Image (cartoon, rainbow, N blue to C red):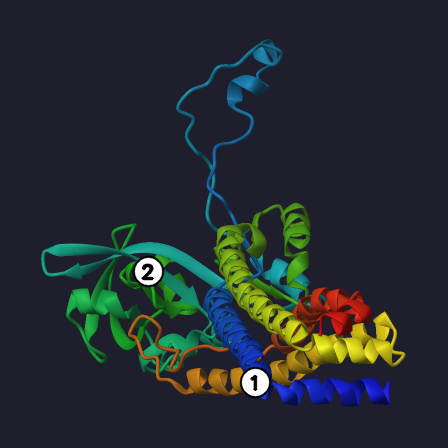
Amino acid sequence: MKLIVSIAHALLFARWRQTLVAAIGVTFSITMFVALLGFMTGLNDMMDSLFLNRTPHIRLYNEIKPATLQPIQQAPPYRNGYHFIHSVKASGSRQELYNSLAIMEALRIDPRVTGIAPKITMQAFFNDGAIDIAASVNGIQEQQESTLFHFAEYVVKGEAAALVKVPNSIILGKALAENLLVDIGEVVQLTTAGGERFPLKIVGFWQSGIQDFDKVQSFTSLATAQKLLGKTASYITDIQIKIKDIDAAPAMAREYATLFNTSAQDLQTLNAEFETGSFIRSLISYAVGITLLIVSGFGIYNILNMMIYEKMDSIAILKATGFAGRDVKKVFIYIAMSIGFWGGLAGLILGWLLSLGIDQLPFETTSLPTITTYPVSYDPLIYTIGAVFSLLSTYIAGWLPSRKASKIDPVIIIRGK
């Protein structure tokens, strides 16, 4: 084996320019594979985090819907008949969660739950002169909301904690504040769906990165929202839940819906289309990266093929002096694997450095206030896949020429010379 390695080294350095070209091809392919996959994975992770940061794993609420059984279906004379009922309207439903305090207490002692955040969702109008601007007001507990859903990170001006410190205060979506032409410290007039009008002091601006969403969102404290609606301290419309195992969300949502007699929405159901987009982006990135590796493999194949034709004399001498076909095959496979190993190693290092460079590029946009540089992932799986594919593609590229070299008849070659 030592002799085979020394012969392979001699053949490698005898045509060092061809060897260098093949290694550069592998290096370039691996570099672009690592940088492209790192950037696309980082982008997917960023998009996922933007969604997951603001989305509960499970949401408990009361869905407004018509009763399953209508009065005529419950009347004894018509119970067994066929019922054709049109334009059914919801009746007797309310948004408030029944026995919300007991539900939250039960969730706090559930070992599968990492945190809960109560919330009140209500519709209201902001009065801008003679014009009323419709918006959604969210009553929240600022500390829990910031801990579980990073609420404070999206407050781009002002302070999130001011909702608790300043009575009758509100944080407006940045786009909504621009429509109202107001600034921090000013007072806005809010009219509830019940017709009650309240003055609220602006203590901050919030920005999610979605312009249409920011035009209708505003936040106030839970106590202030209850005051606006004229409700007691137990009035809650939503309970947002974070759990340890996100994959268990669908099953736990069904369990909670049955146990607490509420409607439940899980993250997977809400996030299905978003995950499909992330999967397609990753698939395209892997396809492009693997294509680069296959192209570099063809380059190695061509170079080794040319090397075999140029080294016919050397191969014939090796076989004439007692080297078996499998030994000759090992020589050329070793050459291919050496090119793949060193070219791949250089590609991994350059890909990492290129990823570091991309990670330092400033990426500032008003739609994503929490992002300052381009997102890049340094997942070890990307580097592992790059290393495996560099060795695998070069092995396959070297196997075919080495098989041809192992079958050369030395007598024919020497006779021709």
Of residues 318 and 361, the one nearer the viewer is: 318
Is 329 drawn above or below residue 119 in the view shown?
Answer: below
- Which quadrant is the C terminus positioned in? bottom right
Residue farthest left in this picture: 130
Residue 142 position, x and y percent, is: 45, 75
Residue at x 23%, y 79% (from the top left corner): 184
**Mark earlier in primary sequence (1, 2):** 1
Q: Secondary structure at mark 1?
A: helix
Spot occupied by residue 160 in the image (x, y as percentages of width and height): 38, 79
Quadrant for the N terminus, please: bottom right
Which residue is rendered at x = 34% and y = 68% of the image? 209
Marks 1 and 2, how far apart in space?
Answer: 55 Å
The disc at residue 20 is: 1
Q: Which residue is mark 2?
A: 213
x and y percentages locating residue 271 in the rendered image: 52, 55
Q: Nearer the viewer, residue 174 or 17?
A: 17
